[in-house]
Amino acid sequence: MSQSLTSFADLLQAAERSAVHLEMRDAYGVENESEEFAAWRKGHRLDPSDRATWWRPWLDLVQEVTSKGVVMRRARIVSEPVNDYIRFEHSGTFTNVAAGEQIRWLPRRYASELALPGNDFWLFDGRLVQFNVFDGDGRWVHTDQTEEPAVARLCASAFEAVWERAIPHEKYSV
């Protein structure tokens, strides 16, 4: 089972100022990525000049939201040396950047002193948190949402602490 892009799209489109995303896993078992990941492992790489081959509904949504002034930022905490999945993510991240999302990478060793929530999350406008819960194999299980102010503050603080230490995508090499 996977989250509906439509329901998530509604959340993202409703954002007025910001949407931040913290990813803390070294691998995700997301079904809709399995073919792309397998192709990447066999040597396929996206061609930045051939947008038609990699532009997909997600990137349309990112561009729509960022073009109305919503700042979208994503931070990824990763173990080093990175595994193949993180190399795969890194190689395709230019697509997110092209759509308007800002992305940074934080080597896990620099996150040890940070207070972080137990799950990946999206935080919309500093008030609505959506936690993404995954199983041990990185498969999405469900989402939990809350507007509890203390939880939103924790997530905002955690994200900003990671963002401050993280390396911008264009400067992080794997």
Image (tube, rainbow, N blue to C red):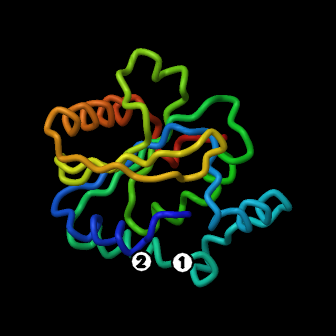
Residue 61's x, y, as percent? Answer: 38, 74
Quarter of the figure with residue 154: top left
167 left or right of 158 in image: right
Residue 161's x, y, as percent? Answer: 32, 29
Residue 37's x, y, as percent? Answer: 73, 60
Residue located 46% across and 67% down the image? 98
Q: Is residue 56 above or below residue 92?
A: below
Residue located 62% across and 39% down the image? 136
Q: CA distance from mark 1 to mark 2?
A: 7 Å
Residue located 29% across and 34% down the image? 160
Residue 50's x, y, as percent? Answer: 63, 80
Give whichever of discs 1 and 2 has the lower sequence position.
Answer: 1
Name the element at disc 2: helix
Residue located 85% across and 61% down the image? 42
Could you tell me the amino acid type at mark 2? Asp
Q: Is residue 31 above or below residue 112?
A: below
Q: Nearer the viewer, residue 147 or 12?
A: 147
Q: Answer yes or no: do the residues labelled 1 and 2 have beta carbons within 8 Å? A: yes
Q: Mark 1 sits on what residue?
A: 55
Q: Is residue 34 above or below residue 56?
A: above
Name the element at disc 1: loop
Q: Quadrant of the N terminus?
A: bottom right
Classed neighbour count for the residue bearing mark 1: other residues with Cα under 10 Å, few (<14), some (14–19), many (≥20): some
Could you tell me the amino acid type at mark 1? Trp
Q: Nearer the viewer, residue 99 or 112?
A: 112
Q: Mark 2 sits on what residue?
A: 60
165 left or right of 106 in image: left
